[in-house]
Amino acid sequence: MRKRRSQGQERGGSSLLAPTLPGPEECGDKSTRRGAEGRAACASLGQGRAGERDAVAASRPFPFAEYPDLRKHNNCMASNLTPAIYTRLCDKATPNGWTLDQCIQTGVDNPGHPFIKTVGMVAGDEETYEVFAELFDPVIQERHNGYNPRTMKHVTDLDASKIKFGQFDERYVLSSRVRTGRSIRGLSLPPACTRAERREVEKVAVEALNGLSGDLAGRYYRLSEMTEKEQQQLIDDHFLFDKPVSPLLTAAGMARDWPDARGIWHNNEKTFLIWINEEDHTRIISMEKGGNMKRVFERFCRGLKEVERLIQERGWEFMWNERLGYILTCPSNLGTGLRAGVHIKLPLLSKDNRFPKILENLRLQKRGTGGVDTAATGNVFDISNLDRLGKSEVELVQLVIDGVNYLIDCERRLEKGQDIRIPSPVPQFRH
């Protein structure tokens, strides 16, 4: 297992927006340096320049002069960042050179979103969540409905046999999917990774995935080797991610060097898929048409455990800790990283003014048919769990099953001209 790198250092450098990470020519090809060994070499080199960096940092204006104008912003970062916090953190950096300004740039550039309240910040590496905890912790607490990362511990449960009532009425539910993300320890996250690191992620993931067998067996398709027609067909079939065009992602650096080292691995039935180097190192997805969420989750759990085993066999491991669970790029995906969702037809309920409150109390999130940046088409919505952190995978999938069945019951009642009621809020955490 890899050792965790040191968690913080004072930041120097002449630019708030440029990482201080040395290039490959200075500290060796990082694709051949794994985990702590390679990072320690780069960190050591960076410390050797401390005098030069400190001199430049000392010449910078008083931190308040760099404080972003957030007066019209509506995201979690803007709600929690203060001049005092900014002053304390603005000259810090992770051992890889990732800074506070790089964390918050996407939230500064994108004041709000038409459909959801966004987080407004991203992590550049695993250490980001520790070095800048003074800001990340309250953002996490707001986004995850009161989960306190200072005092609470995350739980994991991938026992699909515990799921109940996992078959939906397919007159309403068109498809079911469960996905999560996993990050490989020792390599920077997508907003901060170098080309060499991104290619190393691809290499590690594909070598592990080639070891899958049975109904999970499949192959890898590199984006750079696909025709535009092949890519578009996979996108239209909801199997493949497109090049990031959302300003939330592009401002965070997700589209750099596109499509280098990006691709999709899927089994022969296209029911188990892994996206490589999109928003996270990997996105692991189980999906199928229809309403059998229990079968989808069973395949998800089985495949995820097998992928982790194969990764560990090759000397790597996923980023994880007790307080935050699995570490991913966006704080909204911490913990389980899990989003269990369905495409569901709700022509009557979606027009009822109680629909938003029903979703809120069920801890469900509504997206458009094509995702977070789209509207619904033909009264078909993407409904999924709102929370990721503080509940286990089993709890979240069961919450979605129970909630979607409630929505279907409401739709049926409205079809008959009967009244519906707003349910009581579901409890968030076990204490």
Image (cartoon, rainbow, N blue to C red):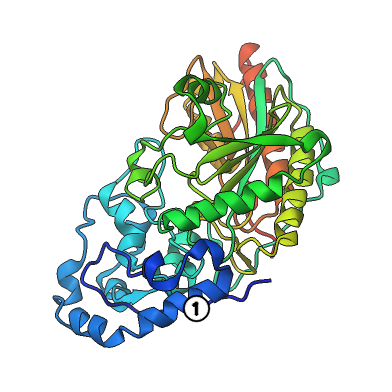
Q: Quadrant of the C terminus?
A: bottom right
Picture quarter with the N terminus: bottom right
Instruction: Give residue 22's position: percent from left, percent from top.
Output: 36, 70
Q: Residue at x 29, y 68 (%)?
A: 82
Residue at image point 29% right, 73% down: 90
- Residue at the (45%, 23%) spot, across then down: 228
Would residue 147 be found to the left or right of residue 196 on screen?
A: right
Residue 408 image point, x, y percent: 66, 24
| Residue 397 visible, this angle | yes
Q: Position of residue 58 (x, y in %)?
A: 18, 83
Q: Nearer the viewer, residue 148 or 303?
A: 303
Residue at mark 1: 40
Question: Which residue reaches farthest right?
Answer: 161
Residue 294 to residue 4: above or below:
above
User: Counting other residues with Cα less than 10 Å from the Cα at mark 1, is it few (<14), some (14-19), or many (20 or more)?
Assistant: some
Residue nearer the viewer, 176 or 168: 176
Q: Nearer the viewer, residue 75 or 349?
A: 75
Residue with the most extreme bottom position: 51
Residue 63, by quadrant, is bottom left
* Amino acid on which the number 1 mark rests in the picture: Ala
Give the x, y percent position of residue 144.
Answer: 53, 55
Q: Nearer the viewer, residue 36 or 287?
A: 36
Q: Is residue 420 visible?
A: no
Q: SS at mark 1?
A: helix
- 17 over 164 or under it: above or below: below
The answer to whether residue 47 is left or right of residue 379 is left
Please name the residue shown 69% across and 15% down the image: 171
- Compared to residue 402, the image places residue 199 above or below, namely below
Number of numbered labels in the structure image: 1
